[in-house]
Amino acid sequence: MHARFFLSKQALSVGLIGPGNIGGTLLGQIAKESIRLKEQFGLDIHIRGIANSRQMILDQDGIDPANWKERFASESIPMDLDLFTRHIGATYFPHSLIIDCTTSSTLAELYASWMEMGIHVITPNKKAGTAPMAYYDHLFDTCLKTGRRFLYETTVGAGLPVIWTLKDLVQTGDRVHRIEGIVSGTLAWLFSSYDASKPFSTLVRQAMEMGYTEPDPRDDLSGMDVGRKTVILARELGYQVEVADIPIQSLVPEGLEQGSVQQFLDQLELLDPVIETAYHEAKIQNHRLRYVGVVDESGKCSASLKSFPLDHPFAQAQGTDNVICFTTDRYDTQPLVIKGPGAGREVTAGGVFSDILRLAAYLGARI
């Protein structure tokens, strides 16, 4: 008898690409909760494919997320994205989902075609949300045309409810006048830790040792990550914004943009006097430095180092905390503030998991 006769209406064929920090943690979270989700809510999650850039494992009946590593090591075959996609999108499953936990631009360019095949998409990958407007518009037009969902809560703020809070404001008719945000966990930690008692370059090296930065810390210090997240938020408000068009203040000393990571680190002290001067200028005003992204009422975006008074939510942020402030018609004299951990595999994976449950509710699960 065909497998379709044994599937519940809420059976979800899931393929995960990128089983690293976030993807691997997500599989662990699903392993802990899958039985409860099926018993309480009727949600039947079948992990039918797991892949990285080189290898993949496919299983018609599902892969136990509790022991996927062992099976991946012993049973994986060369990655074939077309085969992977067809397998996940098997028509006898009521619903299909691909979770992209990579940072790949190539995969992001395929989301619309996946939805045309009947597959929903969930991702923490920022590349689709910051793609050229032509593709961005095509992607969301495809959502409407196919009825498939594209969910991306974790592209801004890790596991914090930033995107859906903003969607709720817009969809209920509130007018958003301004968005400001500390949206880089790395830069948040650097500037909440810096007090001029030790060089800024020392903190950058310390952040590298703790795993807070990208392998090349210029990826964080360039401000590009904040710029991309700012564009994602601006587009939620309907603004036609391209990353290349917004001013982004880079903290990378001039002349050090190219070259190896080691060459950059050898001259990292060039950054120290710039940050120290900015710190003391802020301190004279009883302000603190924070690197923030801004979307103003006209849709103008920026990403830069600014100073804030001590009673401002940004000045009070600690560690890797992200803080996002929405100033709207309803939240006028006092902005709506979302604050919490803006980095970490557990919270980010948890945010992706929340998107899975949000999709399940849309598909009819009792959540």
Image (spheres, helix red, strand yellow):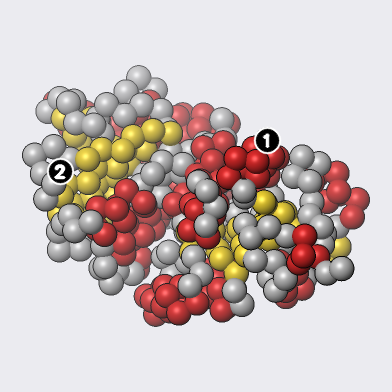
Q: Residue at x 74, y 44 (%)?
A: 65
Reading the image, the residue beneath label 2 is 331
Of 259 and 104, which appears nearest the observer?
Answer: 104
Task: Tell me the CA gap for discs 2 and 1.
Answer: 38 Å
Of 259 and 73, which appears nearest the observer?
Answer: 73
Q: Tell me the element at label 2.
A: loop
Foreground label between 2 and 1: 1
User: In the drawing, what numbered circle is on residue 32?
Assistant: 1
**Residue 245: percent from left, percent from top:** 29, 68
Which quadrant, please, contains the N terminus? bottom right
Q: Residue at x 50, y 53 (%)?
A: 361
User: In the drawing, what numbered circle is on residue 349?
Assistant: none
- Amino acid at dot 2: Tyr
**Residue 263: percent from left, percent from top:** 55, 47
Q: Tell me the element at label 1.
A: helix
- Give the mark nearer the N terminus: 2 vs 1: 1
- Amino acid at dot 1: Lys
**Residue 331: percent from left, percent from top:** 15, 43
Q: Which residue ends up furthest to the right in the rendered image?
A: 74
